[in-house]
Image: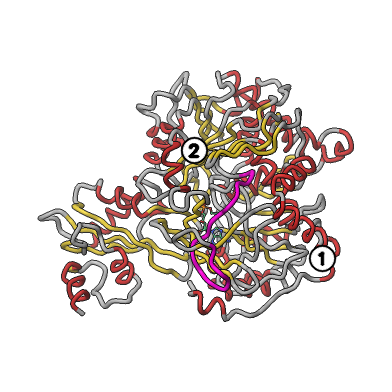
C-alpha cells in the first residue's frame, strides 16, 4: 500500500465529463446547495431526503433525537423497507415498473433467472407468510446463511416485511462462527441452502448449520433452499424445504407498518477483541441513507443495469446489492460465483452479456484483474459501462488509473466510496457529476455528513495534515448500538473522542480538503476488503492443543491489501514444522472461516514482550513486512532475542 508521501505526489485531477455531468441525478449546482444546507442544518437536509426518497405511512414528529451516543431518526414515523423496495414500484405512476427486472441473477454454472418487481413482490409476500407460519413474529431474529441466490434477497425482504430483524452470516464463515452469531442474536429460525457454487464446485452449507445448531436453544426451524441437488441430512420436524413451504404459501401479505426505529438487521463485524460485534441497524434512517446515497453516488436511473460484486453477507451487499438499489426501483444484478470461473474473464463476460452500466467492486479484485492481464477485459465489449465504483479499502493510484482506462475506457467516472458496517451507507465519496476526483482519494463527505481528521485530543487538524478519521455529527444510517452490549458500543466508538464517532481509520486531508483514507489504525486487518480482528485469529490459534501462545499481525500485500501473519509459540515437545503449519491454517478456517487463514505462520520460542508483558506488535509487524532479516517460515525464531538486540541497537 502506498504511503501518504507517494499518495500526495498524486496530482492528477479528473473532472466530471461534460456529457455525464449534464445528465447526472445530482448536478454541480444542486450539490453546491445541498452541501450548504447539509453543513448548516443536517437535520433539515436529511428530512428533505427522507421526504423525497422514502415512502412513509406516518410522518415523523421529530427528525432527530440525539442523546449522545444514542440517536433516533424520524421519531414517531412509520414505514417499511420491503414496501419501499417493492410495493411502491407497483403502484400509481410507478406501476410500469411491475414488469421491469428487479433482480437479474446469474449462477456460477451459467444458469440465469430474472425476477421482475411484480414477481419479486409475490415471492417476498409468500416467504413472509412462510415465516409467519413457522411462528416468526415481529421482533424475532432470523439468521440467513446462504449463497448468492435470489432466495437470499427474498428472505431479507420477507423479514423486513414483517419486522423480523435478519442476521446474515456470510457463507464463508465456519459452523463455529455461525453458532456464535446465532446464539448472540438468539435467532429463532435459520434459512440456508444445500449449498452454492463457488469455483466450479458445489460448496455445502447445510452441514455447517446442522453442526452450529446442535445445542442452540433458540432455533426452532430451518428452511433449506435446494440449489445444488447434493445430499443433506434431514431432521424431521425441524428442517423444511423452501420449495415445499412456498408451494403452499399465500401471496397476500401486507407490509407491517413499522416504527422508524424498529430493528432492521444485525450484522456481525470484527473489532479489537476476540468477539465479533453485532452491529444493529434500524428502519427509517438506514433506508433514507442508503436510498439517497445510491441515487446520488451511483447516479441510478431506470435504464441502468447495476452490478455490485459484493456478497450480500457483508454490509456492501445489504446496502448496495439489495436495499438502496431496489428502493430506487433500479435493476440489480446478482452473481453467485467466483470472479475467475470458468475463466479469468467471467466478470467482463457478465458485463457484456447483461449490458451492465454501473459496476461497483473492490480494489483487491481490481488488483487481481491487473495481474491476470488486460487481454481479458479487452476481449469483451464493455461499452455499456458508464460509472465505476470502488469500496472496501484504499485504492492505490495505479489500480485507479487501470480501472479508469482499461475498464472504464477513460469515459466512466470513478466513485471511491468510504464507509463501514457501522455507518450503514456511504459517507465519504465523489458525486460523479459534480466532484473532481483524484486517484486514491475518496474526496469529500456526502452532503449532510460531518467528517473530520482530528489529533489525539480530538482537535481538528489543519489541512494538509493527517490524523484520525472522526464523524462529528450523527447521521441517519448510523449503527444504533451493538446487539446486547450498549457498554461496548460506547467504549468502542465514543470513548476515544467523547463527542465524536471514532472510525478506527487513519486519514489525511490535502490542501483542497480531500480525504485520503490510510487504513485501519487499530488491531483490525483489512484482508481483501474483509475485516478480520487480530484477536479473533489469535484466539482461534491458541484454541489448538499444540499452541502455547500466538500473536497475529497484518503485512502489506500487493493483491489482498493486507495478509495475515501469525507468530506462534508451540507447546513444549511439539514439533514445529510444515505439517503443523497446515494443521493450524485449517484450524483457523474451522474456527472462523477459510478467508481468515493466515498467509504465513512463523514459529518462535517466545514472543517479544514489553516489561509489562504486552506483545510488541510493532516489532512483529516490522518482521512480518520483511523489515528485519529472519529465516524461512518454519524456522524457530527467538524473537525475544531479536527484540533485545533491537533495544540495544
Ligand atoms: C473499513 C470498513 C463499507 C464497505 C466495505 C467494508 C475500509 C472501506 C474504503 C475506501 C479506504 C475503505 C476502512 C473502513 N474502507 N471503504 N473507499 N477507502 N478504506 O466494510 O468491513 O465494515 O470495513 O473498510 O478501513 O473502516 P467494513
Residue 229 appears in the rendering: no
**Residue 81 appears in which quarter of the rendering?**
top right
- Give the left or right position of residue 511, taking residue 616 as reference: right
Alpha carbon separation for disc pair 1 and 2: 50 Å
Span shown in magenta? 460-477
Residue 619 appears in the rendering: yes
- Give the left or right position of residue 170, taking residue 429 as reference: left
User: Percent position (x, y) of residue 404?
Assistant: 67, 72
Magenta stretch containing residue 273, yes or no?
no
User: Percent position (x, y) of residue 266?
Assistant: 52, 37
Q: Residue, x 42% and y 49% (percent of image)?
A: 271
Q: Tell me which label, 1 or 2, sits earlier in the chain.
A: 1
Q: Secondary structure at mark 1?
A: helix
Which residue has dot 2 on it? 230
How crowded pointer 1 is (Cα within 10 Å; few <14, some 14-19, many 20+) is rated as some
Between 619 and 648, the residue placed more toward the observer is: 648
Q: Residue, x 75% and y 59% (percent of image)?
A: 357
Which residue has dot 1 on it? 21
Quadrant of the image containing the C terminus: bottom left
**Residue 118 appears in which quarter of the rendering?**
top right
- Give the left or right position of residue 517, taking residue 104 as reference: left
User: Percent position (x, y) of residue 597?
Assistant: 37, 55
Q: Residue, x 66% and y 21% (percent of image)?
A: 249
Would you place residue 424 above or below residue 455 in this image? above
User: Percent position (x, y) of residue 203?
Assistant: 47, 45
Between 547 and 509, the residue placed more toward the observer is: 509
Q: Secondary structure at mark 2?
A: loop
Amino acid at each position: 500500500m502506498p504511503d501518504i508521501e507517494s499518495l500526495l505526489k498524486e496530482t492528477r485531477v479528473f473532472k466530471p465529463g461534460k456529457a455525464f455531468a449534464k445528465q447526472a441525478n445530482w448536478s454541480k449546482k444542486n450539490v453546491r446547495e445541498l452541501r450548504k444546507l447539509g453543513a448548516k442544518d443536517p437535520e433539515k437536509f436529511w428530512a428533505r431526503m427522507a421526504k423525497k426518497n422514502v415512502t412513509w405511512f406516518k410522518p415523523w414528529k421529530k427528525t432527530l433525537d440525539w442523546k449522545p451516543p444514542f440517536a433516533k431518526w424520524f421519531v414517531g414515523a412509520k414505514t417499511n423497507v420491503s414496501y419501499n423496495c417493492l410495493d411502491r414500484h407497483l403502484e400509481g405512476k410507478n406501476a410500469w415498473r411491475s414488469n421491469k427486472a428487479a433482480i437479474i441473477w446469474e449462477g456460477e454454472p451459467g444458469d440465469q433467472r430474472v425476477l421482475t418487481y411484480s414477481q419479486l413482490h409475490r415471492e417476498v409476500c409468500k416467504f413472509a407468510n412462510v415465516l409467519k407460519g413457522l411462528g416468526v413474529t415481529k421482533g424475532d431474529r432470523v439468521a440467513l446463511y446462504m449463497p448468492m441466490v435470489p432466495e437470499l434477497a427474498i428472505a431479507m425482504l420477507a423479514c423486513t416485511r414483517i419486522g423480523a430483524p435478519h442476521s446474515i452470516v456470510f457463507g464463508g464463515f465456519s459452523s463455529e462462527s455461525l453458532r456464535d452469531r446465532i446464539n448472540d442474536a438468539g435467532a429463532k429460525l435459520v434459512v440456508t441452502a444445500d449449498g452454492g457454487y463457488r469455483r466450479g464446485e458445489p460448496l455445502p452449507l447445510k452441514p455447517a448449520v446442522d453442526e452450529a445448531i446442535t445445542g442452540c436453544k433458540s432455533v426452532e426451524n430451518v428452511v433449506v433452499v435446494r440449489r445444488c441437488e447434493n445430499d443433506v441430512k434431514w431432521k424431521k420436524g425441524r428442517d423444511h424445504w423452501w420449495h415445499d413451504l412456498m408451494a403452499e404459501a399465500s401471496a397476500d401479505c401486507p407490509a407491517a407498518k413499522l416504527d422508524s426505529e424498529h430493528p432492521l438487521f444485525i450484522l456481525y463485524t470484527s473489532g479489537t477483541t476476540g468477539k465479533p460485534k453485532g452491529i444493529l441497524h434500524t428502519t427509517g434512517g438506514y433506508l433514507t441513507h442508503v436510498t439517497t446515497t445510491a441515487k446520488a453516488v451511483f447516479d441510478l436511473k431506470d435504464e441502468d443495469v447495476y452490478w455490485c460484486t459484493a456478497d450480500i453477507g457483508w454490509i456492501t451487499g445489504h446496502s448496495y446489492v439489495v436495499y438502496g438499489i431496489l428502493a430506487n426501483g433500479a435493476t440489480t444484478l446478482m452473481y453467485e460465483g467466483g470472479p475467475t470461473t470458468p475463466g479469468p474473464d467471467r466478470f467482463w463476460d457478465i458485463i457484456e452479456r447483461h449490458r451492465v452500466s454501473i459496476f461497483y467492486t473492490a480494489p483487491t479484485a481490481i488488483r487481481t484483474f491487473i495481474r491476470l492481464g488486460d487481454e481479458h477485459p479487452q476481449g469483451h465489449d464493455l461499452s455499456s459501462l458508464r460509472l465505476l465504483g470502488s469500496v472496501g479499502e484504499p485504492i492505490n493510484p495505479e489500480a485507479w488509473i487501470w480501472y479508469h482506462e482499461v475498464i472504464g475506457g477513460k469515459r466512466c467516472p470513478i466513485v471511491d466510496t468510504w464507509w463501514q458496517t457501522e455507518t450503514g451507507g456511504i459517507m465519504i465519496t465523489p458525486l460523479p457529476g459534480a466532484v473532481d476526483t483524484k486517484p486514491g482519494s475518496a474526496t469529500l463527505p456526502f452532503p449532510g455528513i460531518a467528517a473530520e481528521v482530528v489529533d489525539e485530543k480530538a482537535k481538528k487538524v489543519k489541512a494538509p495534515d493527517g490524523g484520525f478519521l472522526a464523524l462529528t455529527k450523527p447521521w441517519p444510517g448510523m449503527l444504533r448500538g451493538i446487539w446486547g452490549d450498549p457498554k461496548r458500543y460506547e467504549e468502542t466508538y465514543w470513548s476515544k473522542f467523547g463527542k465524536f464517532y471514532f472510525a478506527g481509520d487513519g486519514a489525511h486531508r490535502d490542501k483542497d480538503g480531500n480525504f485520503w483514507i490510510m487504513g485501519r489504525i487499530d488491531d483490525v486487518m483489512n484482508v481483501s476488503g474483509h475485516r478480520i480482528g487480530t484477536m479473533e485469529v489469535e484466539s482461534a490459534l491458541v484454541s489448538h492443543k499444540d499452541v502455547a501462545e500466538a500473536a497475529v499481525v497484518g503485512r502489506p500485500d500487493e493483491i489482498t491489501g493486507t495478509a495475515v501473519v501469525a507468530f506462534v509459540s508451540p507447546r513444549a515437545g511439539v514439533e514445529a514444522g510444515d505439517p503443523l503449519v497446515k494443521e493450524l491454517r485449517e484450524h483457523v478456517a474451522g474456527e472462523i472461516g477459510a478467508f481468515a487463514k493466515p498467509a504465513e505462520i512463523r514459529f518462535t520460542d517466545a514472543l517479544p514482550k514489553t516489561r509489562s508483558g504486552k506483545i510488541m506488535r510493532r516489532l512483529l509487524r516490522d518482521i512480518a513486512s520483511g523489515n528485519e532479516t529472519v529465516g524461512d517460515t518454519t524456522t524457530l525464531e527467538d524473537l525475544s532475542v531479536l527484540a533485545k538486540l533491537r533495544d540495544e541497537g
